[in-house]
Image (spheres, helix red, strand yellow):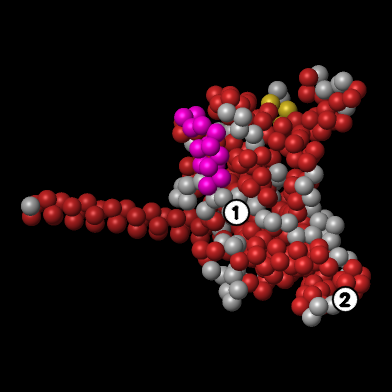
Amino acid sequence: MVVQAKKRELKEAQRRRRQLEERCRLEESIGNAVLTWNNEILPNWETMWCSRKVRDLWWQGIPPSVRGKVWSLAIGNELNITHELFDICLARAKERWRSFSTGGSEAENEDAGFSAADREASLELIKLDISRTFPNLCIFQQGGPYHDMLHSILGAYTCYRPDVGYVQGMSFIAAVLILNLDTADAFIAFSNLLNKPCQMAFFRVDHGLMLTYFAAFEVFFEENLPKLFAHFKKNNLTPDIYLIDWIFTLYSKSLPLDLACRVWDVFCRDGEGFLFRTALGILKLFEDILTKMDFIHIAQFLTRLPEDLPAEEVFASIATIQMQSRNRKWAQVLTALQRDSRDTEKGSPSLRH
């Protein structure tokens, strides 16, 4: 028994040493990456960001200390939003909150750009969504250190884009940005991110365009995972059942936060196509399990993914997904399907030519 106990102790000591060595290697790797980003890439962003070296480094994950800066540069600011504009939108939002809390007249509310009912619904939805944004972190809820920042960004956005307003799921996107940027820069990135075609289609609930995105996804689904695609078809499992939540929150609600940030890294580099490539990577990772499930169990599994997903396994699976169909890339397939949708009455389906 003594010998067995000593063997167990030795094995445990060896395991702890391996873990320590791995942690040291990881820390050294992150430290070297930070130096490369800060000293080589960021000062020469325009000439270096699309180089092979940077793309390879990007895929491995952007170090947290430079992530916000890289995301801001990659997302860009096509809307030309300034810190001053954020301050103006935030001031308007605070005025509306005060007016609402003091029971301002309906005429005043409508003059501010909302009907009283819309305003109340929007404010209540923001309040409710903030309370359930990353609840395990306990930093965005009432009294938490980031609660006011998140509330400010979401309120300011409803004033900046009253035509879009607040939509459930936005809080997760804003929260991830807040963890990596200061408030004004997070607002700038948030507004520009939501202005991208895919995000705008989903947040404005453009059903026709959403269906086109799902159709494009299924083209690559069938191409990459024909067996699972057939199984989903047999069980009448349509992409909206699992994709809507993934796309609405850019995976920040569905995946562990560190893994979601890795997905965001490459999404900022490659654009919307990577969101759908990630979906296919997840499906491939669990293909063997999913092919044995029926409709209910597949839907339950995909809407509540395992909490301990290893980032390297997920990215290894994503790497095997080919976003090319009949020599057409994601953007080309999507454009063809959009044209196909417009030309349906003329009988000229673009993808068949």
Q: Secondary structure at mark 2?
A: loop
Q: Is residue 350 above or below residue 140?
A: above
Against 54, residue 236 (above or below) is above
Name the quarter where the C terminus is drawn: top right
**Residue pointed to by mark 2:** 105
Q: How far is mark 2 from mark 1, CA to CA?
A: 39 Å
Question: What residue did someone put label 1 on?
Answer: 252
Answer yes or no: is residue 73 visible: no
Dominant secondary structure, magenta: helix
What residue is at 75 percent from the left and 30 percent from the top?
333
Which region is colored magenta?
291-304
For this view, does 138 lie left or right of residue 100? left
Query: What is the x, y in percent for residue 275?
Result: 65, 43
Nearer to us in this view, 128 or 348: 128
Quadrant housing residue 12: bottom left
Answer whether residue 92 is magenta in the image: no
Q: Is residue 24 above or below residue 293?
A: below
State the image quarter where residue 142 is shown.
Answer: bottom right
| Residue 250: percent from left, percent from top | 64, 50
The relative height of residue 271 versus residue 222 in the rendered view (above or below) is: below
What residue lies at 67% left-to-right and 74% top-to-bottom?
Answer: 148
The amino acid pointed to by label 2 is Ser
**Residue plotted at (67% across, 55% down):** 169
What is the x, y in percent for residue 188? Answer: 76, 63
Q: Nearer the viewer, mark 2 or mark 1?
A: 2
Estimate how packed mark 2 is, as few (under 14), some (14 to 19) or many (20 or more) residues with alpha carbons within 10 Å: few
